[in-house]
Image (tube, helix red, strand yellow):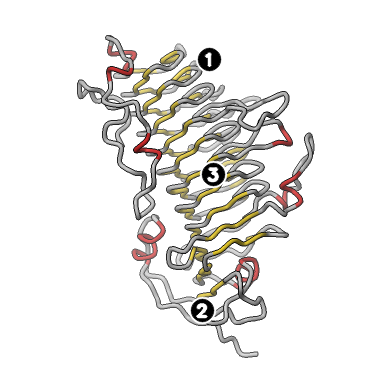
Amino acid sequence: MRNTRIWSVAVTGAALAMALGGPAGPALAAGTTLVVAPNGDDSAPGTLARPLKTIQRAVDLAKPGDTISVRGGTYALTDNITVTTSGTASQPITLAAHSGERVVVDGERLPASHTPVGGSIPRAERGAIHMEASHWRISDLEIVNGPYGVYCDGCDGNVFSRLSTHDNYESGFQLQGSSSGNQILNLDSYGNRDPRKNGESADGLAIKEGTGTGNVVRGARLWNNVDDGFDAWEFASPVTIENTVAYGNGFNRWSFPDFAGDGNGFKLGGGSPAPATAHTVRNSVAFKNAKHGFTDNGNPGSLALSRNSTHSNGGTGFDADVSGGTARLTGNLSIADQRAAAVGSKTVASGNSWNLGGTWNASSVLSTDPGPLTGPRAADGSLPKAPAFLVPRSGTAVGARF
């Protein structure tokens, strides 16, 4: 049968980048647009008038340069969406909600979502969306109740933007293996938990157990997850984190027995032994987490933490005291944490609130109300404005600004 799929209008690399929040690139050639809708038919051509029914069918058909446009509705999975075909740097494959419609990918019916206590999830079943592919642009999807929300292993050059991964049975988003040059932009990941491990491993966002340069997290909000907000356990290459928020992590909201959640806002390493990795975090905030705001977690590498803020964490605001660690902490702010900072003998700490002297408490800042920052995102997916949150009344140039 002749292929009757519709063809999309060619777009420039800059236009696609603007839509997905990534960098501009060379002009892209036109590709096929495949439309998916809950009332579609997988034997249909995938046009707007005759859409496909499942995202998986569109993924199987997609080639470099193609776009998968998903109509609004809930897609209840009986098998996870598996992505193994890659785009190219000049012709990525796009998977996105259609025209601002709400798309929910629901993994509640996946067997791996209900792995028993002490059980393990087979690698191929990890993730409502399981990716082993590169050069995709995935945006504006809500992913819930999966055995992980998004699981990406061996992935390069992808852009994930404006995703919401919540109430999954493992981490909301996990990137691992040999994975380079990925951008995770304006992610909301919350309420993820792992009954099979009593809270030991479900993070909002994990870039862990792997290596690969050029991975960037920007504009994420990671909250009320059972373990950590962000986790870089055993990831041996630097990750850059900017303008990101982690709060309320590590509390046993699910009444798990033998609770094992850690509760850090940002866990910046770990392992036996922990690799020495120079992660960078700037203009980010961690508040009201069960344990530390930011922690090296045994990482002896040259962490760089600048202009970040912590507030009311159950442990230390800035924990960088690993023996031999060479972290550099500059211009950071701690307010009402159990302890402001713990630094090692080789840590360089300058211009931070605990270095400046004086009293730093709730009355030292314009506001400790996170409401504006935790409210609805802007139309383009960026974080809402919070111009007073944890900003020193004195105007001192410490801490993050939103």
Of mark 3 and mark 1, the one earlier in the sequence is: 3
Question: How packed is label 3: few (under 14 Cα within 10 Å), some, or many (20 or more)?
Answer: many
Please give the count of numbered marks on the rendered protein: 3
Residue kind at label 3, given as amino acid type: Gly
Residue shown at 46% from the left, 33% from the top:
246
The label shown at residue 212 is: 3
Q: Do the residues under discs 3 and 2 have CB atoms within 8 angstroms?
A: no
CA distance separating discs 2 and 1: 60 Å
Outermost residue on the bottom side: it is: 2
Residue where numbered disc 1 is placed: 323
Say if residue 343 shows up in the picture: no
Locate residue 156 relative to residue 285 in the image: left or right. right
Dividing the picture into quadrants, the one containing residue 311 is top left
Q: Residue placed farthest to the left in the image?
A: 394
Check the image and report above or below for 257 versus 7: above
* Percent x, y of residue 168: 63, 45
* 167 in relation to 352, above or below: below
Nearest to viewer (mark 2 / mark 1): 2
User: In what quadrant of the picture does the C terminus appear?
Assistant: top left
Q: Which residue is mark 2?
A: 48
The local crowd at label 1, few if under 14, some if 14 to 19, many if 20 or more residues have their Cα within 10 Å, is some
* CA gap, disc 3 and disc 2: 39 Å
Task: Give, as a three-letter code, the residue at label 2.
Answer: Leu
Residue 54 image point, x, y percent: 64, 68
Q: Earlier in the sequence, mark 2 or mark 1?
A: 2
Q: Residue at x 65, y 50 (%)?
A: 127
